[in-house]
Structure formats: structure tokens, C-alpha cells
């Protein structure tokens, strides 16, 4: 019996990464084959037999897994083949003129179908992205006439927006590439433009499909409102979907100066201090939702727990990891999930969408750093990594020990050695002047090696209907994390918040959602920052497992309500296998329960009804505590939501940053502890929520 020689099916291109993970490219998508899930697949080359490959297995378990997956794929005719004389499928041909204003690289005579299309140059191909990249090189294509690209595969047809000229195709290319992060990564990793084998087979039997497409294209060209969208047509089901095309402006440099404007707060009963209703925010962001052309891939409602009226929405966005991370590429390297919270359905939707824009805008997008220099050479004041993320000597020691589990955390860092780095200018809202901070603290997934000293994180990042909204929400998040960290690591006994003070209409659905499976209460964590911070604590009635939610607001009732909505958000995902925080490791301790004998600290600030005044009040309070407020406006046009990253060096973070003296001194200053704890006596469970 002839042994099976394994090869990849001809319509796939395969790239092997340094860790033996595989990126598999096809005309209908990209796939990551992680070695742990698909062992030995990196050895499939069309020469080795199945048994020869299996002989390289590190264990019997790995060998059997390899055999099992191979047999499954072969039986389903997926990905791989054992046919020896497999011919490589033809690569895409050059696009040429095949008729009057008609261009194609497919083996089919399109002339009779599209002879009556006027005033636009029509390009028919099998890969929309590749065609948009190559427009400038198509012979005979007029650079100043409108263009429409039609991509036809066996399953799907894509019809591009009407491009006014060849130059506009670059905008389409950038939009498509942003939602093809795997292709973008492979291109950068390999240093070449990979041509994906064509899977499109057109013959006479497809004429019915092409007749339908001809009518759809005619309608697309004739209706201005449709011609600004990308059309997706399912060749099998006839389903037609329109994808809004709102290209993002390219920004190479950010202006650091921020001037606050007066903004009247009109909605503050669900979701915080807002100038527009949640539904208005949702409507503004709908044109930016699409897995092909959008900044947000999709939005979906998670299944409700039985008896709950609280809706939780999930969104996602694509992201592009830098080449230096090639050894650590996994499926979640290219997509990030976001969740929304709120009492009303519209608020939960708005929350999820805004969080997505907050995170998406923070992705590295070739914005030029302000300066590359030693800290001592900077022309303005600055904060370095050690000041922004104050890790202790012991933490750095654990991070550097490959045998310590702390070394595997994404937060692990090397102590900054004062070398030259890239700096980003941000704005001091406290002193109205520019300040420098490390560039990699401002943006995620940058190509710069200095992120070994500290990486971007979302603490202090926020989105809003205007910049003031975003800054206010960013401040709330920083103040919330600060109070929570001081409570958690010092195990402070805190008083309860009276839930009867909450608006009944908002509290009732929260109570219904939580109380079925959990006992719960709210602790008042408010401290010297003068703004209310609350912790909603849930304890499962059957398992006694814990779960938390936190909230911050100038109104104590809103802080409590936000904590409860976050509790509702975290309950369904509490037990996810990839969660970085183990709720089940929490032991039953008194600081988790309300303590009526503990002193309550009343909020020192009250809402004014104007975001600018509220922000200035918080800034002044922080200044009285010796801390400066910095902000970076990293918004992207034309997205109608503003994004800001707020920094207050000196505040504590819920992730353990154990060289921050405030973490130990505050309980003593507040009179809760008589003597400060230290790094070895504080709560040893890092709050990596």
C-alpha cells in the first residue's frame, strides 16, 4: 500500500512562523494554525509522507493528534490532500482591457453582459484588495475617470464603492487592509506582496449568476446612496448586504494642545455624564460597523441569563500585531473583543461601541513620535516609564525570571535604563503646557522595542461624544482604579452604600439580573480624591464564588449604579478559561463584606452640570494631592466620537504597581490604618481584571 504524501491544497498559500505556527491564506479568508492545536502541520511540504512527518512527534499524544486531524481534513477535502500529482492552482493573471471601459483578469467574456455600462470604468477580478492595490499599473485605465471594482469568487461577490479616480483607490486599499490584519502581517513579515491562488472558476454555467450581477451593478452605479457603499452578494443564497464606506483620514502627527470647552450635561441617569442620549451615540456610530470596511466589525447581543432584563452587547475590532511579536502570534493577536454595559439596551450598545472606538483608535497607525531622545535632552517636562508604571525591584526580579509565572504576563517589563526612546507630547491640563511621555505608553502594538519597559494599556482611555466627555470618563476610570487598588491591596474594611437611594426604575432590572444567583452588596470605596467610587460585590448562592464590578461618578448613586451594571457585565464571563484573574482563588475575608463601623468619606466634589467645570474641579482636587493631570487627544476623523488618554502619574492602578508609595500611605493618612503595610504584607493576589 502506497504511503500518503501530504501537501496543501493548491488554493492555499502557507507561511511558517518562527514558533512553527502557520498562517494559511486563501481567496476566501486567512487562518492561523497554532502548533499546539495542529502539531506537525509545519512539516507538510508535498514531499514527506504522513508517517515520515509523524515520526517527528515529541510524544505519542502529539502523533495521534496529527493523524486524527489529517484524517478528518482528508475525509472532508479541506486544506490538505494526499493526491500526488496535484497541480498548483493558477495564480491571478494581470488585469487587462477586455472591452470598452471594461477590464478583467478572469477567463470569461464579460463584454456582452456589461457593454451598456457608461461613465465608469469597470474592473472584474477575483480579489478586491489586490485589484485596488494595482489600479495604477493597469494599462489603458484612465486615471481621471470613475472606477468600480467587482470581485467574484465561487461564493461571494464584492462590488466596490464608485471611486472618483485612481488616486482614491489608495483610500479603499487602506480601508480593506485595516480589516485584513493577517494579510497585513504576512506582507510585513515576508517582505513581499503574496499572491493568493485563485479559487474562481467561471464557465457557461455561471452565466445566470453574472446576469444577476450585471443588474445589481447597474443599480449600484445608478443610485448615489448605494454607490458610496461596498456591496456584498452571496452567490449561493442571493443575500445582498451593504457595507458603509467611511474612510478614515490619515494622520501623521497629533497636536498636543487641548483647550476645554463648556459642554452641558443632558444625560446622566445611565452611563455617566453625557451630552447626547445613548441611542443618538449608537446612530452616529452605525456607519462605522462592518467586518469589511468598518472600524467596528460587528455588534451582537449576548444571550441573557434567565429572568434578566439586562442586555450585554459584544463588539470587536481588527488589530495588527508588530513583526517583533511573530513568536507570540495567536488567534487573538488579530481581533479584540469588547463588551458594553448599561441598564438600558441602548446604553449597553453605546458602551460597547464606544469602548471599541476607544481601543481601536489607540492601535499604532504610523503617527510620528514627537521626538527621539534621552529624557535629559527633552525641551519640556517629562514622565518616564518608572514614573508612569511604578513597579518595585521585586516585581522586576519576578518579571525577569523565566521560571516565575509573572514573567509570562503581558504587563511584565524591564526596568528603564534611560536610553534614547521615542517620546509623545501630551498636554498638561493642570499647568496648560506640553509634557513628554513615552510614545509606546500612548499607542498599542507599536514596532518599537522600547515597549519592553512599559506598554500601552487602556487605563485612562475613554471615548465620548466630545473631547470633554472622553476626558471626564477617562478621569472617572483612573479615580475608580485608584480607590479600588487601595481597598483591595490593603484589605480595607469599608461601609455599605444604601441601595434604597438608587432610582427604582434603574435599580429594579439590575436587582432582578443579579439576585437570582448571587447575594450582593455595594461598598463605598470613596477616598481623598473627592469623587465617589463604589464596588459591587457578588457571592454565588450555590458555589460561594465571588465576582466584582466597580463604578465612579460625581454622583454617589451613579457610581453605585455603574458598579452594579459592571457586575452584570462580568458575571457571564467570570469563568472564561482565558481570564487573567481567578475569582475562585479569592478567599472569604472580612474586607469583602460591608462594615458599618468603618468611616465613610463623603465626596468633596459635586456635579455642576457642565463637563468643563467638572473636569477642572477634579484636576484641582488632584493637584491638591500633589498630582498632575495629562491628556492626549487621539481621535480619528471622520469618526464622530472623540477619544482621549488621560494620565495622572501617582494614582494607583488595580494591576499591582508596588513601588507606588500612595498604595501604602493613603490608608494611614485617612486614619483607617495606624501603620502602613508593605509589599510582603498587602494582598498578594494581583487584581488583573
Image (cartoon, helix red, strand yellow):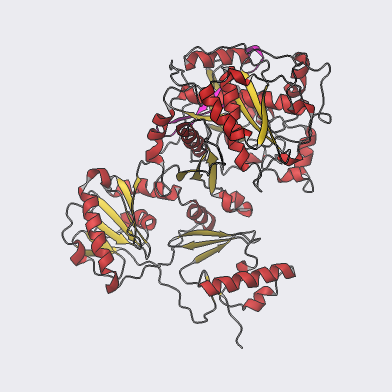
Magenta residue check for 644: yes
Q: Which image quarter: residue 395?
A: top right
Residue for point 59% across, 22% down: 559
Q: How many marks?
A: 0
Residue for point 65% across, 41% down: 574
Query: Can you give x and y, in whole percent of width and height, for residue 81 in the image?
Result: 53, 75
Viewer can see residue 438: no
Q: Which image quarter: residue 32?
A: bottom right
Viewer can see residue 204: yes
Query: Can you give x and y, in whole percent of width and height, for residue 644 in the image?
Result: 51, 28
Q: Which residues are magenta?
A: 623-648
**Residue 346 falls left or right of residue 112:** right
Residue for point 46% across, 52% down: 180
Is residue 239 depicted above or below 80 in this figure? above
Magenta residue check for 299: no
Q: Quadrant of the N terminus?
A: bottom right
Is residue 401 depicted above or below 607 in this figure? below
**Residue 407 falls left or right of residue 475:** right
Query: Can you give x and y, in whole percent of width and height, for residue 628 in the image?
Result: 61, 18
Q: Quadrant of the C terminus?
A: top right
Is residue 106 depicted above or below 486 in this figure? below
Q: Nearer the viewer, residue 65 or 460?
A: 65
Residue for point 51% across, 70% down: 78
Q: Nearer the viewer, residue 618 or 402?
A: 618
**Residue 662 falls left or right of residue 641:** right
Query: Can you give x and y, in whole percent of width and height, for residue 417 in the image?
Result: 71, 35
**Residue 388 falls left or right of residue 298:** right
Amino acid at each position: 500500500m502506497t504511503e500518503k504524501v501530504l501537501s496543501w491544497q493548491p488554493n492555499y498559500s502557507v507561511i511558517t512562523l518562527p514558533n512553527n505556527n502557520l498562517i494559511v491564506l486563501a481567496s476566501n479568508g486567512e487562518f492561523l494554525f497554532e502548533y499546539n492545536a495542529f502539531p506537525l502541520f509545519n512539516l507538510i511540504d508535498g514531499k514527506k509522507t504522513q508517517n515520515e512527518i509523524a515520526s517527528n512527534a515529541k510524544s505519542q499524544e502529539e502523533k495521534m493528534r496529527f493523524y486524527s486531524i489529517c484524517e478528518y481534513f482528508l475525509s472532508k477535502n479541506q486544506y490538505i490532500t494526499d493526491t500526488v500529482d496535484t497541480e498548483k492552482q493558477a495564480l491571478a493573471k494581470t488585469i487587462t482591457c477586455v472591452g470598452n471601459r471594461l477590464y478583467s483578469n478572469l477567463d470569461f467574456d464579460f463584454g456582452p453582459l456589461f457593454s451598456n455600462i457608461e461613465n465608469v470604468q469597470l474592473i472584474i477580478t477575483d480579489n478586491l484588495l489586490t485589484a485596488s492595490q494595482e489600479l495604477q499599473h493597469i494599462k489603458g485605465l484612465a486615471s481621471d475617470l470613475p472606477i468600480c471594482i467587482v470581485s467574484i469568487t465561487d461564493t461571494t461577490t464584492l462590488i466596490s464603492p464608485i471611486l472618483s479616480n485612481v488616486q482614491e483607490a489608495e483610500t479603499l486599499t487602506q480601508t480593506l487592509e485595516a480589516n485584513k490584519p493577517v494579510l497585513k502581517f504576512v506582507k510585513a513579515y515576508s517582505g513581499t506582496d503574496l499572491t493568493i491562488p485563485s479559487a474562481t472558476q467561471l464557465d457557461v454555467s455561471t452565466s445566470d449568476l453574472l446576469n444577476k450581477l450585471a443588474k445589481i451593478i447597474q443599480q449600484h452605479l445608478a443610485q448615489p446612496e448605494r454607490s458610496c457603499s461596498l456591496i456584498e452578494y452571496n452567490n449561493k443564497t442571493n443575500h445582498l448586504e451593504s457595507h458603509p464606506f467611511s474612510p478614515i483620514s490619515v494622520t501623521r502627527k497629533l497636536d498636543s494642545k487641548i483647550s476645554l470647552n463648556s459642554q452641558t450635561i443632558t444625560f446622566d441617569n445611565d452611563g455617566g455624564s453625557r451630552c447626547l442620549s445613548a441611542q443618538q451615540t449608537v446612530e452616529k456610530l452605525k456607519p462605522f460597523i462592518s467586518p469589511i470596511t468598518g472600524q467596528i466589525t460587528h455588534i451582537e447581543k449576548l444571550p441573557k441569563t434567565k429572568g434578566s432584563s439586562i442586555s450585554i452587547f459584544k463588539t470587536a475590532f481588527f488589530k495588527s500585531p508588530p513583526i517583533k511579536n511573530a513568536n507570540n502570534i495567536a488567534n487573538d493577536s488579530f481581533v479584540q473583543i469588547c463588551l458594553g454595559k448599561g441598564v438600558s439596551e441602548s446604553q449597553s450598545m453605546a458602551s460597547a461601541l464606544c469602548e471599541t472606538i476607544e481601543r481601536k483608535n489607540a492601535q499604532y497607525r504610523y503617527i510620528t513620535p514627537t521626538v527621539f531622545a534621552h529624557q535629559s535632552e527633552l525641551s519640556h517636562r517629562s514622565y518616564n516609564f518608572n514614573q508612569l508604571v511604578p513597579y518595585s525591584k521585586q516585581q522586576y526580579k519576578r518579571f525577569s525570571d523565566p521560571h516565575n509565572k509573572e514573567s509570562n504576563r503581558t504587563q511584565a517589563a524591564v526596568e528603564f535604563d534611560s536610553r534614547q526612546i521615542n517620546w509623545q507630547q501630551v498636554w498638561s491640563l493642570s499647568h496648560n503646557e506640553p509634557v513628554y511621555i513615552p510614545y509606546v505608553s500612548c499607542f498599542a502594538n507599536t514596532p518599537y522595542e522600547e515597549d519592553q519597559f512599559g506598554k500601552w494599556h487602556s487605563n485612562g482611555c475613554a471615548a465620548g461624544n466630545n473631547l470633554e466627555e472622553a476626558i471626564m470618563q477617562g478621569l472617572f476610570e483612573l479615580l475608580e482604579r485608584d480607590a479600588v487598588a487601595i481597598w483591595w491591596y490593603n484589605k480595607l474594611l469599608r461601609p455599605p452604600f444604601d441601595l434604597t437611594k438608587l432610582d427604582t426604575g434603574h435599580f429594579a432590572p439590575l436587582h432582578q439580573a443579579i439576585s437570582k444567583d448571587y447575594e450582593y452588596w455595594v461598598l463605598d470605596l470613596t477616598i481623598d480624591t473627592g469623587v465617589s467610587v463604589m464596588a459591587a460585590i457578588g457571592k454565588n448562592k450555590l458555589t460561594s464564588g465571588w465576582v466584582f464590578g466597580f463604578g465612579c461618578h460625581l454622583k454617589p448613586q451613579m457610581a453605585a449604579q455603574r458598579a452594579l451594571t459592571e457586575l452584570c457585565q462580568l458575571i457571564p464571563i467570570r469563568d472564561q478559561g482565558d481570564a487573567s484573574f481567578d475569582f475562585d482563588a479569592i478567599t472569604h475575608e472580612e474586607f469583602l463584606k460591608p462594615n458599618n463601623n468603618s468611616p465613610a468619606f463623603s465626596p468633596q466634589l459635586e456635579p455642576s452640570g457642565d463637563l468643563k467645570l467638572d473636569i477642572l474641579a477634579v484636576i484641582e482636587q488632584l493637584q491638591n494631592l500633589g498630582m498632575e493631570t495629562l491628556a492626549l487627544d487621539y481621535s480619528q476623523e471622520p469618526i464622530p466620537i472623540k477619544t482621549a488618554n488621560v494620565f495622572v502619574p501617582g494614582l494607583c492602578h488595580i494591576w499591582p504597581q508596588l513601588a507606588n508609595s500612595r498604595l501604602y500611605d493613603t490608608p494611614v493618612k485617612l486614619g483607617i490604618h495606624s501603620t502602613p503595610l508593605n509589599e510582603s504584607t498587602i494582598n498578594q493576589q494581583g487584581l488583573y481584571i
